[in-house]
Image (cartoon, rainbow, N blue to C red):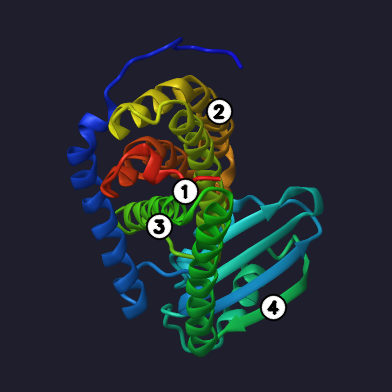
């Protein structure tokens, strides 16, 4: 593995009090966002708030910005448009909060029939999500995240021991809540696509944490007489270059997707980009310091085999 830093000797554990305070703030904001989402006070997408989705196939390509302006002129602001250039298709998503007299799908069809009369189209699909279904999707998304956290505890507990699993789960919860809280503060849309990004983030964060934990376990076997803080610091420094190289590789992919991936991919890529940064931070400054909270010698921390 290419090393961009070489061997470092940074006292990461010496910053643990400050990192716990900072992480506590991020987690609090994430919990606040979760409460607001449950109350329907956040910027919910149609997956959670309800709404209408219509997919149209045009005879000729249709400029997305012209379509957006046409919808706005006819009383449909804040619509989401997704273009499929290869098939001349356009997906129109309208939240349920939009107040118009007739049905949303009929309103959308009328707009395109009037504004783009020279470009005929057919309806590929049209469906509506009611508030009840949106609430069920919220519940299912929360269950999916909780089950993934339980799976993390069981996996890491089986590979290492229970306290390692708890530390990894806390760090992963921290990452998920941090990204969710930042999205809430930025008034970004909360949708199933964001939930997908959060679950992907949980897997990435766990992988990074397991690498750090694996080196900690190796050092605990070799340096049983050294203070636990020293052992963990050495382990984190030994894998620091690898952690940065892997994170930078992922970030180099996500930055172009965030900047030029289009409206639909933007929030998903942004969530992953934030998640990689937060996940890398938590592996060093959250998951590893949590092991110090269990008092005892390294020999007691490491399960004897």
Q: Could you say whether the residue bearing mark 2 is in a helix, strand or loop? A: helix
Residue at mark 1 to residue at mark 4: CA–CA distance:
28 Å
Q: Which mark is residue 246?
A: 2
Disc 1 designates what residue?
271
Task: Measuring from the top left, give residue 225's x and y in whole percent.
Answer: 34, 28
Read off the residue under disc 3: 173
Dot 2 or dot 4: first in sequence order is 4
Mark positioned earlier in the residue sequence (1 or 3): 3
| Quadrant in which the C terminus is drawn | top right
Say which residue label 4 marks.
Answer: 126
Q: Earlier in the sequence, mark 3 or mark 4?
A: 4
The quarter in which the N terminus is drawn is top right
Label 1 SS: helix
Residue 173: x and y, percent?
40, 57
Front residue of this view, candidates 107 and 273: 273
Residue sitting at x 62%, y 57%: 82
SS at mark 3 in the image: helix
Which one is in front, 19 or 301? 301
Q: Would residue 195 be visible to someone looking at this image?
A: no
Residue 76 visible in image: yes
Toward which corner of the image does residue 12 lie, by quadrant?
A: top left
- Answer above or below: position of 162 versus 53: above
Relative to 137, say whether 244 is above or below. Answer: above
Earlier along the polypeptide chain: callout 2 or callout 3?
Answer: 3
Q: Nearer the viewer, mark 1 or mark 3?
A: 3
Q: Are marks 2 and 3 in contact (CB under 8 Å)?
A: no
Q: Nearer the viewer, residue 271 or 80?
A: 271
Q: CA distance from mark 1 to mark 2?
A: 18 Å
């Amino acid at each position: 593995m290419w090393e961009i830093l070489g061997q470092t000797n940074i006292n990461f554990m010496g910053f643990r009090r400050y990192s716990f305070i900072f992480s506590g703030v991020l987690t609090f904001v994430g919990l606040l966002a979760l409460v607001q989402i449950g109350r329907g006070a956040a910027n919910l997408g149609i997956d959670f708030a309800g709404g209408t989705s219509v997919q149209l196939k045009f005879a000729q390509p249709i400029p997305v910005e012209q379509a957006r302006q046409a919808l706005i002129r006819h009383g449909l602001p804040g619509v989401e448009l997704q273009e499929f250039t290869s098939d001349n298709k356009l997906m129109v998503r309208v939240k349920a909060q939009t107040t118009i007299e007739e049905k949303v799908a009929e309103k959308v069809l009328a707009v395109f029939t009037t504004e783009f009369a020279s470009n005929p189209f057919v309806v590929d699909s049209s469906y509506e999500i009611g508030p009840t279904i949106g609430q069920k999707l919220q519940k299912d998304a929360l269950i999916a995240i909780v089950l993934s956290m339980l799976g993390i505890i069981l996996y890491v507990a089986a590979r290492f021991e229970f306290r390692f699993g708890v530390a990894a789960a806390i760090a992963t919860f921290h990452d998920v809540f941090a990204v969710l809280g930042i999205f809430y503060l930025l008034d970004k849309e909360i949708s199933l696509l964001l939930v997908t990004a959060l679950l992907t983030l949980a897997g990435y964060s766990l992988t990074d944490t397991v690498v750090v934990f694996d080196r900690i376990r190796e050092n605990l076997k070799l340096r049983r007489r050294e203070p636990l803080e020293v052992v963990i610091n050495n382990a984190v420094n030994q894998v620091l270059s690898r952690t940065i190289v892997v994170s930078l590789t992922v970030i180099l992919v996500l930055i172009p997707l965030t900047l030029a991936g289009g409206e639909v991919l933007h929030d998903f890529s942004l969530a992953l980009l934030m998640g990689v940064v937060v996940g890398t931070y938590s592996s060093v400054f959250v998951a590893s310091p949590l092991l110090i909270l269990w008092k005892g010698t390294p020999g007691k921390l490491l399960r004897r085999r």
